[in-house]
Amino acid sequence: MSQPPTLPPARSFPEGFFWGTATASYQVEGAVNEDGRGTSIWDTFVRTPGKMLVDANADVACDHYHRYREDVGLMKDLGAGAYRFSIAWPRIFPGGTGAPNTRGLDFYSRLVDELLASGITPFATLYHWDLPQTLQDQGGWQNRATSQAFAEYAGYIASHLGDRVEHFFTINEFHNVVEGGHGAGVLAPGLKLPAKDLNQLRHHVVLAHGLAVQSIRAGAPRPVKVGPADNVYVVTPVIETPEHIAAAQLATREINAGLMTVMLEGAYTDRFLATAGADAPEFTDADMRIIGSPLDFVGINIYQSDHYVTAADNDDGFFDVPFQPSHPHAASWHRLSPEAMYWGTRHLQQIWNVPEIYVTENGCAATDQLHDDGRIYDTDRIAYMRAYLTQLQRACADGIPVKGYFHWSVMDNFEWIAGYNNRYGLIHVDFDTQVRTPKLSATYFREAARRNAVV
């Protein structure tokens, strides 16, 4: 007689580990002209001919602004213990500075209260790309004054939500803000700046982060925790040997020199400045002290390994191995490389001794075809999650201080220049009817969160 089935041995995460989901204000909220919200650079960008891959905008998106109670209920059903959301700067300061718009703040206050009532811990991101258009008209991130304006906005939010929100992320994906929006021009505001201007803008963005760290701590009515949420370039040793691991650490520090490294060290590396040469940013010692303000945690958005390296006898000390493409996802930029979870988190701890790490985004665009029975059997997303969570659990088992995982995203939403073509959600959204339908991956997430383990 066969034995009753038993569960495989648990590959558990640490006690108190946060199982969360994430969204961004412009991608889900809609209500772009309600309750005093100002115009953002994305409102402008989606209406600029030639910028979008498809004809789409986020005027309604997921209508989260009106349906947040329903959405929080769905998160609770998922077993999520945390929700990372972003605050739309133009809702709070429609012109970027000046008198605050209390109706905008009231929305986030209601959202936080709803989350707490549902047993979900709020994690707030202060900038997820929706810069007030008025500030862009004044130079945007090219203007150093924007860094100070961001700090003032951040301090205001902390003073009003810091009684209930303990974790604040300053800026989301510095690399995409800088390179995507102002180098390649594929994201708002769609600029292609020369190297000198781009490096100076990058400096203003990390300065804004440092100023915001200080402003949040000064403004909050109680002690809070602050850190960035960056899409670091993840470097993986092709073979796990001591010399290749050392090369990967060296490469991680140098490839991320203009963003993560300077935030964690308070200085630009010699190689970064030498490579920039006459195009290096202008800065002061006071700037560097601000940028290097001590952090309580670091959030990283991990989707793939960006570089595979070996040790090399050259000036860099590493060789960037060409990647042989395979395992593409529905999003063309995204390749399957679950080891990024292990090395991305490990390098943070080993190079910079980061006290707490959060994986602030991880997910994939899957096929998400509706079955005849009306359900979405997204087995490809489940396979993706299982592979990446296995590597994240490996990091935790090795003592890397990962405190939480936020799946991108809780629901399908407006996916920037791809509009509504790429679906990343655990929950399917019919954008014509706004009906929400949990996918099979939602069941997987719920079980992983319930067991606090890889399922």
Image (cartoon, rainbow, N blue to C red):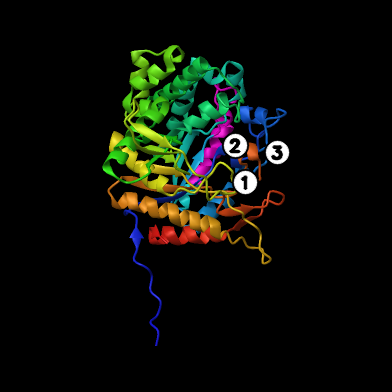
Q: Position of residue 37 (x, y in %)?
A: 62, 30
Question: Which residue corresponds to the image point at 59% horizontal and 20% vertical from the top-left?
Answer: 136
- Secondary structure at badge 3 equals loop
- Secondary structure at badge 2 equals helix
**Few, some or many residues within 10 Å of mark 2 (<14, 14–19, 20+):** many
Q: Position of residue 367 (x, y in %)?
A: 61, 54
Q: Earlier in the sequence, mark 3 or mark 1?
A: 3
Residue 34 quadrant:
top right
Res. 54 mark: 3
**Few, some or many residues within 10 Å of mark 1 (<14, 14–19, 20+):** many
Q: Earlier in the sequence, mark 1 or mark 2?
A: 2
Question: Which residue corresponds to the image point at 35% horizontal and 27% vertical from the top-left?
Answer: 316
As drawn, which residue projects farthest toward the bottom? 1
Question: Which residue corresponds to the image point at 65% horizontal and 34% vertical from the top-left?
Answer: 32
Is 423 situated left or right of 174 in this image?
right
Res. 324 mark: none
Q: CA distance from mark 2 to mark 3?
A: 17 Å
Residue 41 quadrant:
top right
Residue type for callout 2: Tyr
In the rendered image of this protein, does residue 138 appear above or below residue 110?
A: above
Report how many numbered discs are placed on residues in the image. Answer: 3
**Magenta stretch, residue numbers:** 88-114
Is 265 situated left or right of 408 in this image?
left
State yes or no: residue 326 in magenta.
no
Q: Which residue carries the number 1 mark?
A: 422
Q: CA distance from mark 1 to mark 2?
A: 16 Å
Dividing the image into 4 quarters, which one contains the C terminus? Answer: bottom left
Residue type for callout 3: Val
In the rendered image of this protein, does residue 5 appear above or below residue 298?
A: below
State yes or no: residue 100 in magenta.
yes
